[in-house]
Image: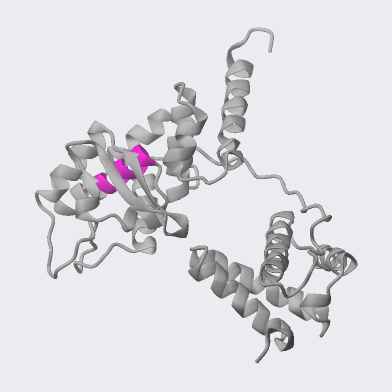
Amino acid sequence: MSESSLTNQEWIDRFLQYLRIEKGVAENTVQSYRHDLEMYRTYLAGRELTKVQPADVSGFLKFLYRRKLKPRSASRAFAAVRGLHRFLLLENATAENPTAAIEQPRWWKPLPHVLAFEEVDKLLASPDITTYKGLRDRAMLEVLYATGLRISELIGLTVDGVNTEAGFVRCIGKGSKERIVPLGAAAAAAVLAYLHVRRVRKPTNYLFLNNQGNKMSRMGFWKLLRLYGLRAGIKKKLTPHVLRHSFATHLLERGADLRAVQTMLGHSNISTTEIYTHVMRERLKEIYKSYHPRA
């Protein structure tokens, strides 16, 4: 079949395969794009992708707004459409990109929730380290707060990917990108204590294992975190990402460089990391209002 005779669906499938194989885009993102591009294909109602005009793209954005899509979701859908048309240009299927002159929808990022230093201390002290399970859970909590890893990166850690002597972990992040993140002394000590009692029922290199000896799951760790949050008396909604947000915010509050925090978090764009400077400003305002006599 010649490229000129490909259907819209076949072009979309090719684009998603390109993202997956050549660009190394995470599967979750690929599936989100698939959903967005299915809406786009439906909206075009048979109009060929290679003949789409800017007015068609603008019409699609209006269609999204009529469906009362959240600004963030509309922004992602436009990113998928723009990427698709750039791909068509790359494949010489068309001579122009109809999205080039269209401004991407803007959305406001909500400020992330963070824990206070005292809340982190209570959370990290909540596992009973006289038990095997407590040692494992304490190590997971310590590593998560010490490194700011995503939950998928934490449960994906391997035994040989953690160097407690040199003080770093090696993880695989979004887009299958590897990065090295420093590991603090407290977290390194917690990992060593866990490794001394780690139970391996079957050959595996994963560091954190569940009660069956398998790799810890996202849901399994989420349930543990919620349990320890309740035990520590933390009233805020507690998720693995809250610890990641707390890691970044606490570093910046103590003078860390924004670029260094960006590298440790694995953000490809500095604008993603800048949200934490807003968190710092909001917390400073709260402190000012609470303590200044004329606030």
The answer to which quarter of the image holds residue 13 is: bottom right
The quarter of the picture where the C terminus appears is: top right
Residue at the location (34% across, 43% down)? Answer: 180
* The residue stretch that appears in magenta: 138-147
Residue at the location (64% across, 7% down)? Answer: 293
Q: Nearer the viewer, residue 120 or 29?
A: 29
The answer to which quarter of the image holds residue 117 is: top left
| Location of residue 1 in the rendering, given as x and y in whole percent from the top left corner | 65, 92
Is residue 138 visible to us here?
A: yes
Residue furthest bottom in the image: 1
| Location of residue 65 in the rendering, given as x and y in whole percent from the top left corner | 82, 62
Relative horizontal placement of residue 28, taking residue 43 as reference (left or right) = left
What secondary structure do most residues of the magenta stretch adopt?
Answer: helix
Residue furthest top in the image: 293
| Location of residue 116 in the rendering, given as x and y in whole percent from the top left corner | 45, 31
Residue furthest left in the image: 196
Magenta span has 61? no
| Location of residue 108 in the rendering, given as x and y in whole percent from the top left corner | 71, 45
Relative horizontal placement of residue 253, taking residue 199 as reference (left or right) = right
Residue at the location (9% across, 49% down)? Answer: 196
Relative horizontal placement of residue 39, taking residue 22 as reference (left or right) = right
